[in-house]
Each structure stands twice: as C-alpha cells, then as structure tokens.
Amino acid sequence: MATNNTIQGLSFSATLKKRIFDFFLASCGIFFFWWLILLAALLARIDTGENGFFTQRRVGRYGKIFKVIKIRTMRTVSDIDTSVTTSNDSRITTIGHFFRKTKIDELPQLINVFVGDMSFVGPRPDVPGFADKLTGDDRVVLSVRPGITGPATLQFRNEEMLLAEVENPEQYNNKIIYPEKVRLNKDYINNYSILKDIRYILATLLGN
C-alpha cells in the first residue's frame, strides 16, 4: 500500500481549495437531492430484493481503503465474480440500467465527498488490486482523493459498451483501458486547476 511520504501531488493550497470547493458543492447536492437518493434506494430495494444502497471497498487517497456508496443496480449472481462490468451484464436489473445510464446510482457518492473520502473530480476509486499496485511515477494518482468524474471518466463514459464488444473484457480492461486511465489521471494531476474541475463537472452534467 502506498504511503503519503512517498507520493507528491497537488500543493497544499490547491488541495485546500479543492477540498473547500468539494465540501460546499457536496453540501448543496445533498440538500437538493436527498429525496431522490432515498427514492432510488427504495426502488433498488424492491427491484433487487437487497439493500438499496450498495457499498464496496475502494482505494482512496494515499492508498487508504474506504467504502464507496452507490445505489444498487445489480442482483447477486453466484457464478459471476468479477469487478469488470459490461453493458450486457446479466446482473444489471432493468431499473439498474436506467440508474446507470442517468448516473442516479452515483448520487450517494455525494456523502463520500462530504466526509472527505472522495472529490468531485479525480481518478475513479478502484477496487483493491489496481491503484494500490501502481509503481513509480504512476503512484501520483494516489496523491489526490478519487473523484466522481474526471478526464478518464469522460473519456471512457461508454466503457461498459466497449467492454461488451470484446472477447475478454477483463483482459482488455487491464491491458488497454486501465493504463490509458492512469495516463489521463497523471496528466490531470500534473496540470490541475479549479477551473478545469468546474469544466469536467459541467461536461459530466451536460453529457459532453
């Protein structure tokens, strides 16, 4: 696991401004959308027969493990055990497809941002076995809080459809998609600005 004395990233002032921005925006988001989060969780509970909120261990800043919160969009299938999801994954429910397409399933992550586990913009939080295995300069990805959106997220917004078209989705993700995400995230950190964060958020909301 990476440690904070071996990773350099944003300056202290940039990190502080980013955190203040995140806290303010997350507070507003929770205030305006708490009802939609609860409604979506209730529908997911009825749809899947399980807890409408889905939590999963993810790798955060400096390699610290936290639990990301999402709306449950998949039912449990005993013979499927992979963290790579395609658009035709049999585990995704009908309502789950709608939640994933509209990004409603991501709304509970406002809580993760509010408490400081995540940021609005940054590398997507990976399950253990990916980001925590980075070496060399690539480990700068761990210097910032993982984000709800970001350049890599926008670049691969149709990732599930892309993976559905290849013969071995898990191998394609590991060999092609993930290394490109690392490159995009490194570039984001090395050229960070709050204005770019605002642009990424607007691009996500507008679907650009």
Image (spheres, grey):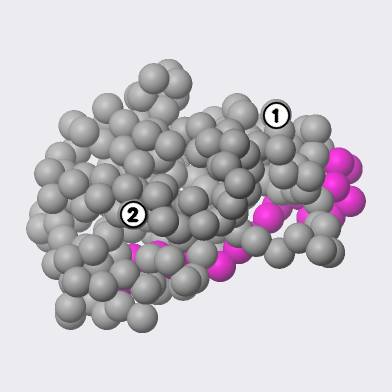
- Compared to residue 1, the image places residue 73 above or below, namely above
Q: Nearer the viewer, residue 80 or 185?
A: 80
Callout 1 amino acid: Phe
- Compared to residue 61, the image places residue 92 above or below, namely above
Percent coordinates x, y for residue 101 in the rendering = 61, 29
- Residue name at image x 31 percent, y 38 percent: 151
Q: What label sits on residue 57 in the rendered view?
A: none
- Compared to residue 88, the image places residue 7 above or below, namely below
Spatial CA distance of label 2 from label 1 is 29 Å
Residue 62 in magenta?
A: yes
First in residue order: circle 2 vs circle 1: 1
Residue 39 relative to residue 36: left or right: right
Q: Nearer the viewer, residue 185 or 33?
A: 185
Residue range highlighted in magenta: 46-63
Quadrant of image for the N terminus = bottom left
Q: Quadrant of residue 51?
A: bottom right
Count neighbours of disc 2 (C-alpha within 10 A) and say few if under 14, some if 14 to 19, many if 20 or more. Answer: few
- Compared to residue 23, the image places residue 170 above or below, namely below
Residue positioned most to the front: 167
- Residue name at image x 49 percent, y 71 percent: 128
Q: Is residue 41 visible?
A: no
Count neighbours of disc 1 (C-alpha within 10 A) and say few if under 14, some if 14 to 19, many if 20 or more. Answer: some
Q: Secondary structure at mark 2?
A: helix
Label tally: 2
- Residue name at image x 89 percent, y 51 percent: 49
Q: Nearer the viewer, residue 176 or 55?
A: 176
Q: Secondary structure at mark 1?
A: helix
Residue 90 relative to residue 26: left or right: right
Read off the residue under disc 2: 179
Callout 2 amino acid: Pro
Read off the residue under disc 1: 98
- Residue name at image x 25 percent, y 67 percent: 139
